[in-house]
Image: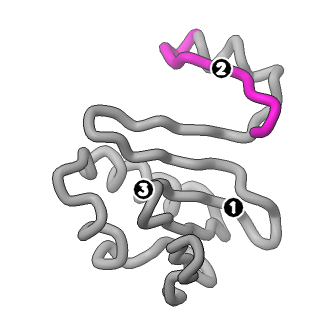
Amino acid sequence: MNKEPNKSNNVILTDAGLLEDTVWKRALQGFPTSLVCSIREKLLKNIPGITEKFNTNSRYFGYWIGTDKDRAYIYIQKKALRIDLCISPSFKKDIEQNGFEVIPRENF
């Protein structure tokens, strides 16, 4: 079930699962959404209990499981996607070997 946006920060979230496409697609007209759709489908299929939110101002999706804090963000940009993950630094080398750039940050 989708919840209404929070007026102060324009965040729309679900109780469980993913948001309906109609909730976020209007805010992302003209942006590369096909890859986002593919990622969202894989997350739903492979991560039981995932919950999603979408910020209409910043154009990002956030993900978590249960009562855990946010563990992943996908920022939608005109020509790219930026994905921030909360992972152990021990995975850095493996991720880079798969062709991804890893930039550690203190705040996530």
**Secondary element type, mark 3:** loop
The location of residue 47, given as percent across then percent down, is 62, 58
Q: Name the amino acid, label 1.
A: Trp
Q: Is residue 5 above or below residue 11?
A: below
Q: Nearer the viewer, mark 2 or mark 1?
A: 2
Q: Residue at x 55, y 68 (%)?
A: 53
On residue 59, which mark appears?
Answer: 3
Q: Nearer the viewer, residue 41 or 7?
A: 7
Q: Which residues are magenta?
A: 97-108
Q: Residues within 10 Å of mark 2 (few under 14, many from 20)?
A: few
Q: Residues within 10 Å of mark 3 (few under 14, many from 20)?
A: some
The location of residue 55, given as percent across then percent down, is 49, 64
On residue 103, which mark appears?
Answer: 2
Q: Nearer the viewer, mark 3 or mark 1?
A: 3
* Residue reaching furthest to the left: 30
| Corner quadrant of residue 9 | bottom right
Work out whether mark 3 precedes mark 1 in sequence or the reverse, and give the earlier one: 3
Q: Name the amino acid, label 3.
A: Arg
The location of residue 77, given as percent across then percent down, is 35, 41
Q: Residue at x 51, y 76 (%)?
A: 12
